[in-house]
Image: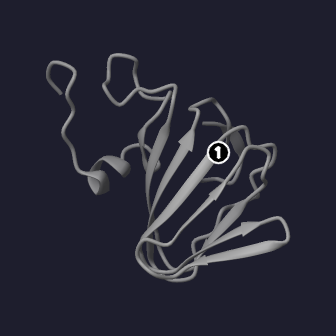
Amino acid sequence: MTHGVYVGNAGKDAALDRGWLLGHFKDVADPRHSEDVEIKWGVHPKGDARARWVTGEERTALQVLISGRFRVELPGRSVVLAEQGDYVVWGRGVDHSWFAEEESVVLTVRWPSVPGYRVDQDGSAGTA
């Protein structure tokens, strides 16, 4: 990182911070720090599932399928992202969860970037 510019690889950098490439949780001196938006490069093995539903969501989100087959669970509805470029958007207050039907790569964009719900690897809840 030099002079406010960061050049990286989404696959490599994502492995360092649970997939997150950009957001409020990055150091304020890092050009990837943002309080406006969060971006995640999610790599999910087949059968990977969110440990629990996100409730009380305070952000709008967009998920775009890069590869694989990925199911997003919304209240009363499942959305399957099956072709590269398929995407789903949901607004504030929409509970959600997900399941990787095949090994999948999904790009997630959430806004604004605010501390919110996350599930740690051990399944316990925390703030992101």
> What residue occupies the far left of the structure in this picture?
2
Classify mark 1: helix, strand or loop: strand
Residue 110 position in % (x across, y down): 56, 44
Residue 8 visible at all: yes
Q: Nearer the viewer, residue 99 or 92?
A: 92
Colouring of the image = one colour
Residue 111 position in % (x across, y down): 57, 38
> What residue occupies the far right of the structure in this picture?
76
Give above or below for 83 relative to 127: below
Residue 120 visible at all: no
For label 1, count other residues whose C-alpha is less than 10 Å away and answer few (under 14), some (14-19) or many (20+): some
Q: Which residue is mark 1?
A: 60
Give the residue displayed 45% in from the left and 81% down from the top: 83
Give the residue displayed 64% in from the left and 30% down from the top: 115
Could you tell me which quadrant the N terminus lies in? top left
Residue 76 position in % (x across, y down): 85, 71
Query: In the shown orientation, is residue 50 left or right of residue 38?
Result: right
Quadrant housing residue 62: bottom right
Give above or below for 46 relative to 41: below
Query: In the shown orientation, is residue 49 left or right of residue 9?
Result: right
Could you tell me which quadrant the C terminus lies in? top right
Q: Nearer the viewer, residue 87 or 106?
A: 87
Amino acid type, label 1: Thr
Give above or below for 41 relative to 82: above
Give the residue displayed 16% in from the left and 18% down from the top: 3
Q: How many numbered marks, from 0 up?
A: 1
Quadrant housing residue 53: bottom right
Residue 59 position in % (x across, y down): 66, 40
